[in-house]
Image (cartoon, rainbow, N blue to C red):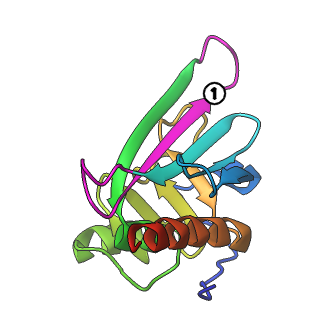
């Protein structure tokens, strides 16, 4: 996997619970290929968008259960192309299309409203307050996560070539 910058201090917009997220499961052999990341209170799924809808696209969905039952849940989704998905998870050198956004947030790679990443600190869909209750999700991008994302894309692309 591509080597990433590791910072001792996360960006101020990244939530420390992002370190609890890891690979929960994947299925690369069935017709509905996917990777699931998560923790006790979060879940992130990544799967291909059916190519009849949008070619070279990936659906990333997340759900966060906030503290107590009165705080509720946050959820959302974003669609990324392969270049953006790889950039979000530190698998390529794409920095994004908006250098002013990156500079403002100190991001190494970002697409406004989709993701922002500094080193291994990833936020989807955007930087937040790093507080409980934020609707965005923070992920510490471990090599195991990178490997699963890479293998998902590799498997789907290989099947599309048939």
Give neighbour class at mark 1: few <14, some 14-19, many 20+ (Cα, 10 Å): some
For disc 1, the marked residue is 65
Give me the residue at 55% from left, 31% from top: 133
Q: Is residue 11 visible?
A: no
- The quarter of the rendered structure image containing the N terminus is bottom right
- Percent coordinates x, y for residue 138 in the rendering: 57, 52
Q: Where, by quadrant of the figure, is residue 14 drawn?
A: bottom right
- Percent coordinates x, y for residue 4 in the rendering: 60, 84
Q: Determine whether the residue tagged by mark 1 lies in a helix, strand or loop.
A: strand
Q: Where, by quadrant of the figure, is residue 87 drawn?
A: bottom left
Magenta run includes residue 65: yes
Query: Height in image: 134 above or below 122?
Result: above
Total residue callouts: 1
Frontmost residue, 5 versus 153? 153
Relative side of 153 to 59, left or right: right
Frontmost residue, 11 versus 139? 139
Query: Height in image: 75 above or below 4?
Result: above
List the single residue furthest toward the top. Answer: 70
Frontmost residue, 118 versus 158? 158
Give me the residue at 52% from left, 79% from top: 91
- Percent coordinates x, y for residue 47 in the rendering: 49, 51
Give me the residue at 37% from left, 50% from top: 49
Q: Is residue 131 visible?
A: yes
Q: Where, by quadrant of the figure, is residue 58 drawn?
A: bottom left
- Percent coordinates x, y for residue 103 in the rendering: 33, 75
- The quarter of the rendered structure image containing the C terminus is bottom left
Relative side of 77 to 52, left or right: right
Frontmost residue, 60 versus 159? 159
Magenta-tinted stretch:
49-71
List the single residue furthest toward the front. Answer: 162
């Amino acid at each position: 996997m591509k080597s990433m910058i590791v910072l001792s201090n996360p960006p101020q917009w990244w939530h420390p619970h992002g370190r609890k997220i890891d690979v929960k499961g994947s299925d690369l052999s069935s017709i509905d290929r996917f990777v699931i990341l998560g923790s006790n209170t979060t879940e992130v799924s990544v799967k291909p968008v059916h190519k009849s809808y949008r070619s070279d696209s990936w659906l990333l969905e997340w759900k966060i259960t906030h503290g107590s039952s009165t705080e509720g849940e946050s959820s959302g989704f974003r669609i990324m192309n392969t270049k953006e998905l790889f950039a979000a998870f530190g698998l390529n050198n794409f920095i994004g299309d908006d250098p002013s956004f990156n500079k403002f947030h100190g991001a190494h790679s970002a697409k406004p409203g989709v993701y922002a990443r500094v080193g291994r600190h990833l936020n989807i869909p955007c930087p937040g307050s790093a507080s409980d209750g934020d609707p965005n999700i923070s992920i510490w991008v471990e090599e195991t996560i990178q490997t699963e994302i890479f293998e998902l894309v590799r498997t789907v692309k290989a099947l599309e070539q048939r």
